[in-house]
Every structure is written in structure tokens, then in C-alpha cells.
Image (tube, rainbow, N blue to C red):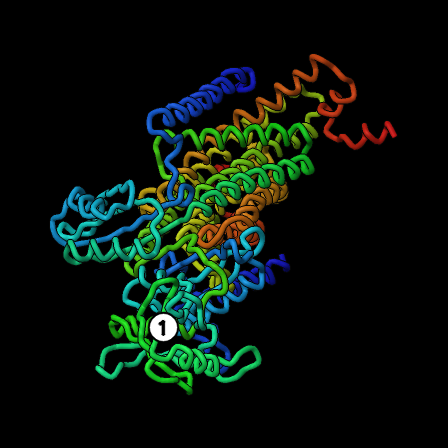
Amino acid sequence: MNLVSRKKLWLFISGIVITLSVLIFFAGWRITGTPLNFGIDFTGGSIIEISLTGDISESQVREKVQGLDLGSVIVQSIPGETAQERHFLIRTPVLSPDKLVELEQEIKDSFVGVTVLRSEMVGPTIGALLRRQAVTALILALVLIMFYIAWRFDIPYAIVTILALIHDVAVTIGAFALFRFEINSSFVAVILTLVGYSVMDSVVVLDRVRENRKLHSGAAFSKIVNMSILQSFRRSINTSVTTLLAVLAIFIFGPVVLRPFSFGLGVGLITGSYSSLFIISMLLVVWQEWREKRPRKAYARKVNEPSKTKSTKRKT
Amino acid sequence: MRNLNWKWLVVLSMILLSIIVIWPGDPVSKYVPFLSLEFKPQLGLDIAGGIHIVLEAVDTPEVKVEEADVKAVEQVLRSRVDALGLTEPNIYRLGGESWRKIIVELPYEEVGGIKDPAEAIQLIGKTALLEFKAEDGTVLITGKYLRTARSTTDEMGSPAVGFEFDEARARADGQKTFEEITSEHLNKTISIVLDGEVISSPRVESVITGGEGIIKGDFTFDEAARLSALLRGGALPVKVEIAETRFLGPTLGYDYLREVELAGVVAFILVASFMVFKYKHMSIVSMFSLSTFLLFLLAILLSLRATLTLPGIAGIVLSLGMAVDGSIIVFERIREEVMQGRNVRTAVNNGYKKAFSTIFDSNVTTLIGTLVLYQFGTGPIRGFAVTLSIGVLVGLFVTLFVSRLLTEAIGIKYLVPRTFKVRRQ
């Protein structure tokens, strides 16, 4: 099977998916006013989750809360444990501790059997800090990984790996834009984990390429890449499946609060293994062919030969 | 295979040690006095419940915040929380660009003393600046010179706050000053103001020499007790804003815990079944390594007293899926070697040898991600970074050492030939 000969198809598929991600991102922005469903960790605001007894509807709770004049209030009912006990999520702009006490008092006075299950308030400065930290963390991780790959493999390998990672991150963000899962502080964990995992997958393929070049130094580069993909195919799929099974278990059986987290990891795993098998290697081939077309001797040699140290030594 | 024996000894004693660490209660100290190996899982606030407050010292036109101020705020918060009767709070300053921030964490059992978390948050963030003001509004004396305060009753038996000014000390004499004030303002009213709000405006009927007095107000007993606790702790030296609060009740977190545990069990079963399905007899090896992996990981996390947060446990489940990756890489290598016609022993040896650099490189990249995450994350997310990176390291050890040992012991003879359908040569 010659996968490399269809490289345009594989890259085309990724191109479509990325274009779709970008489109969804901006379409969502137009329709809902925000590109992603940012949680209070990023936007600032307050959330209170309460349980109460009796057959109370969302609008009854909303009515009481709106009477307090707290700004835009969202009341959402969540399935509780029993029919008599109902759970509600109340989301408001940032509440001062005094206002929070007032709100809780109002609810306790209005309804029966009220328990505050959790309450969260995130001020506006935290959100800004978190955004800045998230971006810094992502860039730092990408740079470190790039250096590591460049050191263990070669610079072209590092560049295609980073391209594949940007691809994975873009697709994952697109999925979040489509399904409107909440972006909270664990989103940073999702992105960094999927970056780490996706590289792990890619390394296996790259490692094969490196090894095969030593073994078959005469063969064409595209042949070597094709061979390497086929050899790592089964294990790449299998390792992704096992991790995906673990993520799936968390998504289905784990707590609701972890759902955005496991969703992100799941999407990241799938796109990560696709990019490891079909993007990185194809980009390497494209890179190589491009180099061969406009031959700057020293560089072409560098990519073609497994041991670059020799060629550089000869020069000095 | 003489060196096989010591390796097995290492693995088996590690397994034994892990079981002892994980075993609930303290099995060892029963038999060996003075040796306690009891490790209780430390559950994060996102499971056990509690209050997490981030306070930030902010500049005002009068005062620019310096590091010493933040330290002073930390000190006041500490004594304030103590005065509220909470014995095991976790109070710390953040470093780096968040140096103005202080985190107060109160586990739920501790908060039990306060009926209402919202009120606890309100109390902790209060400036608690007590001022005695003259009729024209000039500040006569502040709570800074108080020695103590306690809840008491007035002559009518209603709740009130009793206070006592400090004796002569190096910086100022509270008692003396208060005596002067009361003699100057005899038969005039003085306002007692807390954080800009007038609590009461009593008339000075006599000169007070001992520095003692009471604040009457429209208090309940609870309010009087809380106010005196606040006054005992002292006022915050700079303006403090509440940047973030998180409260979790005791029930929801344990529901989450049960669900994530169930997810872990399901994940284990799914991954194990997949291995049985794909790798037939060889899955015995991966099953054994998966079990030892879990055992070692939990034992290490417990003995490091790592705090288990919800994302942290998700990290354990995730690393379960990733731990078998090593096995799969090796098994596939062995399969290739066997297909190329090598004999089983060489295939196994080559499999592990060739898989090494792959497994090593791929784990390093995962570690890079988790280390960056640890650096930037806080609280629960840090827990995830910790469990995942320890998980990756333990997985590495288990694949390269434990699983290899078992493959060499029974794999070469029984498992590999059956799995990959080759005759032993």
C-alpha cells in the first residue's frame, strides 16, 4: 500500500477540517456573540449551585433572583438525585461577598430545603491572568518540544512536528466552538496534554523514519516514509485506542464537571493520531521534494543522509 | 538466567511495599512499634469540600502595596482565621507576578464551625478597621491599639462587644490615649465606626482609665462573637480585594469522587479487554504490568502525600491508558521480529532493545507538557500535572523493567509463540 502517493488527499482532508474549524469558530462568534463558551474562570463572574425540595421550576427561581437586581442572570436546572429534590445552577456577574450572602438569603427565604452545594466567584483580573498564562504555557511547551525534537532528530522534523501540533490544537478548538463545551481552567490542561500526547505519537513514526534511513540508506525518501508509516500503523492505532478508551470512560461515567476536559482530550487524541500518521510524514516528504527541486547542495545532502555530523565535519 | 532472581526480588518487594502503603489503616505498626506506615489519601478541596479564597492587596491613592504589606496581611488573616476557631487552614502567598495575592484554604470539616460559607468569605475579606471618631469626623483612635476583644453583654443583657486597649508599649499607649480622648470628649458623642459604617454612637459619660469598654449595637450573639474575633485578629493594613472564591459543599465532591472512581474501573476493564482481544496470550504480560503500574502509582502518590484532586484522578485514569502504550510498542516490535523469522528469544530481546528509544523519546515529550502545566497551573490542575507525570515515569519503569522480566520468564516459552503463531525454534 502506498500511502505517500496520496499525500495530497491526506493534507487536503486536514485542510478541510481546519477550514471548517475556523469557519465554525467565526460562525459561532457571529451567532452567539462569543467564539467559544468561556466559563467564569476566563470571563469572571459567579456561579452558585443549589439543591432544594419541591416542584420548583427554573422560571420561579429566576424570578426571585432577578428581583435582587444583580445584572444578567442565567438560571439553569440540572438533573438532581431524586424527583423531589431539584438542582439549579445560577450564573451571575461577579458578586461581592455581601451580595452573595444576600442572594443566598433570598433563596433560602423563598424556597424549602435549600442547600448551597457549591459557589464560585472569579474576579475579572483572574480571567485576564489566566488567559495570559494559558497562551504563555502553550508557546513555552511548543518551543521546548521543538528544541527537543530538533536535538533528538533534526530541524525539519521539529518544524513539521510543530505544524502538526498547531493543526491538532486548531481542530480541538474548532470542536469546542462547535459543541459549545465550556472553556474553563482545565482547558489549558487539555491543550498541553494533547500536545504532549500527539508528539508522543509522532515521535514513534519519526523514530521509524530515522531508523529506516539507516537501514535502507539507498532507498527514496518517500519510500522510507511510506514503509515507516505502515510499520507504525498498527501500534499507533492501538495505543491511541487504549488511551481513547480511558478518556471515553471518564467522559461517560465520570463527573459532569470533567466532561469538557475528557471531550477535549478525546478530540485531541483522534486528531493527534491522524496528524502523526498522515500529516507529519507527508509534510516531511513535501519538504524533501521541495528541497530537491531547488537544490542547494549542502542542505539537500543534510536531509538525505542519516548522519549529518559527517557532512558538517568534512567542511571544517 | 541467574540475574533474573534479584530482579524478581526487587519487583516482588516493591509490590509488597506498595500493598503495605496502600492498605487502609496501619498494618505495620501493630507488629513493629514506632514504625508507622499509615498514609491517608489527601483529598483536594474540589473533592472533600471547603472554601478556597484568593485575596489580592490593591493600591489605594494613599498606600502603594509593598511586599511587607502582603506579608502583614497574611499574618492578620492567619490570626483572624485562628480567632474564628479554624485550626487547620492553609494560608499562603503566591510568588512571581501574583505576589500581591494570598490564598486561604479552609477544609470543609473546619468550616463546619461557621454555618454559612458565604459569611465566612465575607468575614475573611473584611478590612475590619475599627475607628473611634469625634463628632466632626476626625479619627481619635483606631483598633490598632486594641489588646483584645470578646463578646459580652451590656447592662441590659443584650449582646455586645467588649474591648480593651493596650498598655504602654514601644509604639503607643492605647490606654493612655483612650483616657485622654474620653476626658476631652466628656459628655459628647463618639462614633464607633467599622470599615466606614457607624456601629454605634455612645455618649461619653465618664473618663475611662483602664482602657476597657463595650460596643453596643444591634447585634445578635453570633454577630458579637464574630466581630470580636475580627477585632482580635486586627485590621488589614492595606486594601484587600477578593479576587476569587470557591466553595464546595461536602456532598457534591464525594459524588464526583464516586463517579470518577467508577470511570477508573471501567477504563481498566476496557483497556484490559482490548489487550486480551488484540494480543491474546501476551496480554497476560500487559495485565500484570498494568496492575503493578496502578499499585506503584497509588503507593507513590500516597507516600508523597500528594493531594488528590478531581483532574488528578482523571490523570491517573488517563495514564492507565497511556501506560499500556509501552507494552503495545514492544509487542508490535516483537511481532515484526517474529515475522522476519527471528527466533523467539532474539525477537523478544530485539523488541525491547529497539522499542527503548521510541518509548523514551515519546515519554519525554509528554513530560515536557506536564512540567509546563505544573509551572502554570494552580490547585486542581497542578494535581493533574503531578499524577500524570508520575504516571508517565512509573509507566516507563514498569514497561522497561517489570514487563520485560515477565516476558523473559514466561513470554519466550509460552506466550509469544502462542500469540504470534510461531513454532518455537
- Please state which of residues B339 and A209 is positioned toward the viewer in this rendering: A209
**Most distant residue in the left direction:** A55
Residue at x-position 54% and y-position 26%? A230
Residue count near mark 1 (Cα–Cα under 10 Å), binned few <14, some 14–19, many ≥20: many
Is residue B25 visible in the rendered structure shown here? no
Residue at x-position 39% and y-position 84%? B208
**Most distant residue in the right direction:** A316
Residue A203, horizontal then vertical, whole percent:
59, 35
Is residue A134 visible in the rendered structure shown here? yes
- Please state which of residues A280 and A58 is positioned toward the viewer in this rendering: A58
Q: Is residue A8 above or below residue B191?
A: above
Report which residue position mark 1 lands on.
B190
- Please state which of residues B34 and B274 is positioned toward the viewer in this rendering: B34
**Most distant residue in the top direction:** A293
Residue B233, horizontal then vertical, whole percent:
43, 72
Instruction: Please state the chain letter of the residue tagged with numbered disc 1 in the rendered image.
Output: B
Seen in the image, is A83 located left or right of residue B399?
left
Q: Secondary structure at mark 1?
A: loop
Residue A102, horizontal then vertical, whole percent:
26, 55
Q: Is residue B137 above or below residue B283?
A: below
Check the picture and name the quadrant holding the N terminus of chain B. bottom right
Residue A259, horizontal then vertical, whole percent:
35, 42
Give the residue type that dot 1 points to: Ile
- Please state which of residues B303 and B134 is positioned toward the viewer in this rendering: B134
Residue at x-position 48% and y-position 61%? B306
